[in-house]
Structure formats: C-alpha cells, structure tokens
Image: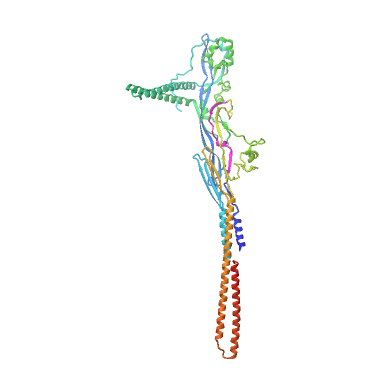
C-alpha cells in the first residue's frame, strides 16, 4: 500500500517539474504586418530627444556704392562691403518615441504559475511604468498532488507687400560730403563682377536697419515713461498728495501707454520688413534614435529662391585691401583721415592693420559668381548633438572596464558590425552571433530576451553653427548653443532580467520620467525556491505520515472487529452444541438400539463442544496478547 502512495507522488511530481520557469519575452520592433494581421503582445517605446528647430536666414548686408572725389570734378563710384546673410534659430526640445520593443507578456503564464503584468505610457507615448509579478505555484500544487496521491492510494486500497515710401525710405545710396580729392586713387581701383543686392532689396534692408534703431529709441522712451509712472505712483500714494499729483500720475500713465503703443507699432513694422528679407525653415532633428549625432540643416528650395531673388550680379568698381594698403603707403599722411572715412574705415582693424573684409567671399566675386553660388557659400547650417560627460566606449583591443569585460559587449558589437557589412545591408538580424558574457545582450536581434530594455541617463547639448560640412568645427560661427538636457538615445542600453524559476515568486516595478530618466525601480524575490521546496516537502511528508498512521489504526480496528466477530460466532456455536446436548439428554429411547444411537450423538456433540471451547479459549488468548502488544 505504501508503494502505491510513492508511485502516485513520483508521477505527480514528474508532471509538475516540466516547464516551471517563466519570464518576460522582449523583442525589438522593426516591422509592420499587413493591416489585417495582428502580433502578440504589447509594444513600448523608449524616449528620444528631438529638437524642433526653426531657422531664419535673412539678408543682413549689401555692398554699398559711394562717390569718392578724385579731382578735376571727377568722382570714383567705389563699392565696398559684400552680401551678408544672418542666421537665427528658435529651438525647442521635446521627448518623442524612439526605439521600440515588444513584450510577449503571455510568456509569463504557465500551467503551474500565476502572473500579472501592467503597463503605462506618458502622454508622448513613451514608456512610463511596467509592473510584472510571477509566482510559481508548484509547491502548493505539489501539496495538493500529495493529497491526491493519498486519496488515490486510499481509493485503491479503500508675409504682406511693403510700401517703402510709407516707411519713410526715400531710396538711393547715401551721398556723403565730398572728402579730400584723391587724384591717383582710380589707378589702384579695378572693375569686377560682384553679387549685390537688388535696389529694392537694398532699400528694404536700409528701412529694416532704420527700424531697428527706431525700436531702440522707442524702447528707451518706454523705459523713461515707466520710471515716471513708478515715481508719480509713490508720490500719489502719500497722504499729502494733491489732485495735481494725481493728474501728473494720469499723464505719466498715458505717456507710458503711448510709448508702449509706439514700440509695438515699430516692432510690427520691423517684422513685416524682416519677412520680406528672410526665409524660414523648420525641421525635426535628429530624425531617429539611431541617427548620426551631426548633420546639415535643410535649406528649402522655396527659401533659397526667395533670397536669391533679392540678389543680382553686376559690374562694380572696388578697391581691394591690398591695393588700398599700397596707396596708403604712398600717402602716409592720409592714414588718420582714412580711418574716419565712411568707405575706407572698414579696411582697418581696431589695431590699425588693413585686412580683407571677412564678408567678401570668392563665390560672390568674379566672372563665375552667381546669386546661387554666393548664397550657398555662407547659408549652410549644421547641427551637432554633443555628449556631456561621455563614458569611454568598449573599444576592441583596448583595455576594457569592468562592465565591458563582464558582459562581453565588445565582442558582440564587433561581430554584429562585421556580419552586417558582409550581408551588404544595414539590417541583417539573422546573421548575428551571440558571444560569451553572462549578461551581454544584443537588443536589436530577433531573439527574444527574458526582461526589459531601458537606457541609463545621459546628457547632451545642441550646437548649431554656420557650416555646410555637417558638423561644427571650432572655427565655425555659432548660431545656437543649448544647455545640457537629457538625451535618452545616448544612454547606455541596460537589460533588466525578469525570470521566475520553479518554486520562486518575483516582482518587478519600473517607473520612467518622460525624458527617459529613471524615477524608481524595484525587484523582489518574495519567495525563495529552497524555502518553498522545504515547506512543500515537509507538508508532503506530514501528509504521508498521517496517511500511514490512519492506515495502521484502521487496520488494527479492523482486526479487532474481525476477532470479536470470530469470538461471537464461536460462542454461538458452543451455545448451540450445549443446547443440542441438553435436548439429547431429555429424550427417552424406546429400544436399546435407539439408546445407543442417542449415546453416540451425545458423545459427538460433547466432543464438538469441547473443540469449540478450545478454539474460543485460543482466540481469546491471541486477542489479549495482541492488545498487550498494541496490535
């Protein structure tokens, strides 16, 4: 009977021990199915930093022509300066969905385990929180299986058009008071082809610059009016203030309102002027979480054409700085006068040296110069996302840090790149080879991983510069230099394993902020396999012992009942024999033969009675002995 119980337990345990471990199952999201096809699980996206960049390129400078008297009533129409374009940027950072992963949460389920999975996202669609629990119920089920085995054993046994005139722009180049005559200056000048501003564009630019000065003046007026209001408010608030003080306060407030209104009108006029001189482009950058960290900013065809239409090519007379230096060497007495001259003062540095105008570009001067070439030479803008406090990378062949050596990341990344290049395409997941490293993971292959991928915190700042090279060298003029912000896509990829083995129970809770930084994380093993196994084994042993005790008690009770029943039957048999002997003795035979027959029957009955009494005595003795021995 004990063998039956053991066989039942072994059979139950063998069925329970098959496939008791469960885990999350995570794979990268790279593809979409047909619109009528569905995939199992839920996908989550890690955030990535993306900038909304609004670039404005505006015409900022035009070559200007001024008459320079050269004697005998003659003038030299000398052109100085060059076309220049300013670049400004409005930048706003945002966190959007980046790399995506799919979690096959049903993989947590198992016939002998309970599980729970909860998932939350931020309004931007990125991962906010994941809560997962898994509890293997093998121990509890094993207890029930023991009960079942015992039961079985028991059963088996029992922009608008502009009116330049309305803006106060009279038009035409500025005419200066006649400077000293320079009779030999034409010999040093030369005629060249130059990209210059069209007359209307030059007038509009002059109006814009005049408007900028007007705004400064009106802003100063507003500042003074505001100070007057503050002063009169203090006076009017005193107890001895008269009605005259109050009237002055009212006048000051009116003056402040008028100044504010005038400044607003000037700003509106300036915005209208700038709209005709500029072109705007808006872009979202970087395009993807794994996109390069540097690149060229777009310049739309429509914006490019708008600025090109403000320019033209024409022949002008110029005095190159090198030729001017030669002329000045021949006229050293004119040096101080030249430094104050509106045309020639641009040739001098603050230290008095003569240098080339930095705005003058070869693409804007010469027979091959065109507005398109000139504009392309200095309208390029590049962006670069610069890491802040970057950690060293795992470089093949170099001394590796603890984590690189522990996780085998170096070898994995090396083989991943090599396999991809051999395939000749950027994405060949089937060719990835997993290498040594107990925790190293290739997150973007097709093999499911038992856990969750996140990225550790990283910071970066955005640089925008005047460069067409696609990056921002130190020599490039800055357009924008942002403050360090969280850049999740630059953080180290981390793997948070979640696997629950037989007899264990585990909990994982993860909360991320919308910028990808970690808010909270907890991982608990709420039940150890050893403790659960010991408890299950103890319970099983207790159940088996109880079963064996009950079985032995029942067997003893059954034996007592059988003995009592045998004694009762034997006593009944003796009583029958005694009554039969009494009946024989009471009979009177009629003949000697009948008497002999009765005597013989009486003797046989007496013998059977004696045998029955002997058996009864033996049974009573055996029962007494068994009771003394506890059977």
Residue 309 placed where, x, y %?
Answer: 51, 25
Colouring rule applied to residues: rainbow
Q: Residue at x 60, y 88 (%)?
A: 596
Q: Is residue 489 magenta?
A: yes
Q: Is residue 307 shown in magenta?
A: no
- In the displayed structure, does residue 488 sit left or right of residue 219? right
Residue 351 in view, yes or no: yes
**Residue 388 quadrant:** top right
Q: Position of residue 387 (x, y in %)?
A: 57, 32
User: Considering depth in this image, is 178 or 473 the residue closer to the camera?
Assistant: 473
| Residue located at (59% from left, 10% from top) | 330
Rendered view: 418 above or below 313: below
Question: What residue range appears in magenta?
Answer: 476-496
Quadrant in the picture for the C terminus: bottom right
Q: Is residue 37 at all visible to an observer of this figure?
A: no
- The image shows residue 491, relative to residue 553, as above or below, that is above
Answer left or right for 273 relative to 593: left
Q: Nearer the viewer, residue 147 or 391?
A: 147
Disc count in the image? 0
In the rendering, at what x and y percent does residue 161 appear? 45, 26
Q: Residue furthest front?
A: 628
**558 left or right of 243 in image:** right
């Amino acid at each position: 009977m004990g063998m039956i119980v053991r066989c039942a337990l072994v059979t139950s345990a063998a069925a329970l021990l098959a496939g008791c471990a469960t885990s999350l199952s995570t794979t990268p999201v790279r593809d979409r199915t047909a619109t009528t096809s569905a995939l199992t699980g839920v996908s989550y996206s890690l955030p990535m930093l993306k900038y909304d960049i609004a670039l404005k390129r505006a015409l900022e400078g035009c070559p200007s022509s001024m008459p320079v008297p050269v004697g005998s009533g003659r003038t030299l129409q000398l052109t100085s300066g060059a076309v220049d374009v300013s670049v400004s940027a409005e930048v706003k950072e945002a966190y959007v969905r980046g790399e995506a992963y799919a979690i096959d949460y049903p993989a947590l389920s198992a016939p002998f385990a309970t599980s729970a999975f909860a998932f939350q996202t931020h309004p931007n669609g990125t991962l906010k929180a994941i809560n997962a629990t898994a509890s293997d119920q093998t121990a509890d089920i094993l207890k029930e299986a023991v009960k079942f085995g015992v039961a079985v054993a028991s059963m088996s046994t029992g922009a608008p058009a502009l009116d330049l005139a309305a803006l106060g722009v009279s038009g035409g180049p500025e005419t200066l008071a006649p400077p000293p005559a320079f009779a030999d200056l034409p010999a040093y000048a030369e005629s060249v082809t130059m990209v210059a501003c069209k007359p209307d564009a030059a007038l509009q630019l002059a109006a814009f610059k005049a408007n900028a000065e007007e705004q400064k003046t009106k802003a100063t007026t507003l500042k003074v009016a505001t100070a007057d209001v503050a002063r009169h408010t203090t006076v009017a608030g005193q107890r001895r203030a008269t009605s005259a003080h109050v009237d002055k306060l009212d006048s000051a407030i009116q003056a402040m309102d008028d100044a504010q209104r005038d400044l607003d009108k000037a700003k509106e006029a300036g915005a209208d002027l700038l709209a005709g001189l500029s072109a705007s482009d808006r872009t979202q950058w970087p395009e993807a979480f794994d996109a390069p960290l540097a690149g060229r900013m777009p310049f739309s065809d429509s914006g490019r054409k708008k600025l090109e239409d403000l320019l033209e090519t024409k022949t002008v007379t110029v005095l190159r700085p090198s030729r001017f230096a030669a002329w000045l060497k021949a006229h050293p007495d004119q040096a101080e006068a030249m430094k104050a001259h509106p045309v020639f003062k641009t040739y001098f540095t603050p230290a008095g040296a003569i240098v080339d105008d930095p705005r003058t570009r070869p693409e804007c001067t010469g027979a091959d110069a065109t507005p398109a070439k000139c504009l392309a030479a200095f309208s390029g803008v590049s962006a670069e996302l610069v890491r802040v406090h970057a950690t060293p990378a795992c470089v093949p062949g170099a001394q590796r840090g603890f984590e690189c050596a522990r996780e085998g990341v170096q070898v994995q990344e090396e083989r991943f790149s090599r396999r991809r290049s051999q395939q000749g395409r950027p994405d060949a997941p089937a060719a990835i080879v997993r290498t040594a490293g107990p925790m190293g993971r290739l997150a973007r292959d097709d093999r499911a991983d038992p856990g969750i991928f996140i990225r550790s915190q990283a910071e970066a700042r955005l640089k925008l510069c005047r460069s067409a090279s696609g990056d921002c060298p130190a020599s490039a003029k800055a357009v924008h230099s942002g403050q360090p912000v969280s850049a999740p896509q630059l953080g180290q990829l981390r793997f948070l394993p979640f696997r629950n083995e037989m007899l264990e129970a585990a909990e994982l809770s993860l909360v991320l902020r919308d910028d990808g930084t970690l808010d909270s994380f907890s991982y608990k093993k709420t039940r150890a396999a050893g403790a659960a196994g010991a408890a299950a084994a103890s319970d099983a042993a207790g159940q088996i012992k109880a079963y064996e005790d009950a079985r032995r008690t029942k067997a003893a009770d059954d034996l007592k009942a059988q003995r009592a029943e045998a004694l009762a039957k034997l006593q009944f048999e003796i009583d029958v024999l005694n009554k039969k002997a009494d009946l024989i003795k009471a009979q009177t035979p009629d003949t000697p033969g009948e008497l002999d027959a009765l005597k013989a029957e009486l003797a046989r009955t007496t013998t059977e009675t004696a045998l029955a009494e002997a058996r009864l005595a033996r049974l009573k003795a055996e029962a007494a002995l068994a009771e003394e021995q506890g059977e």
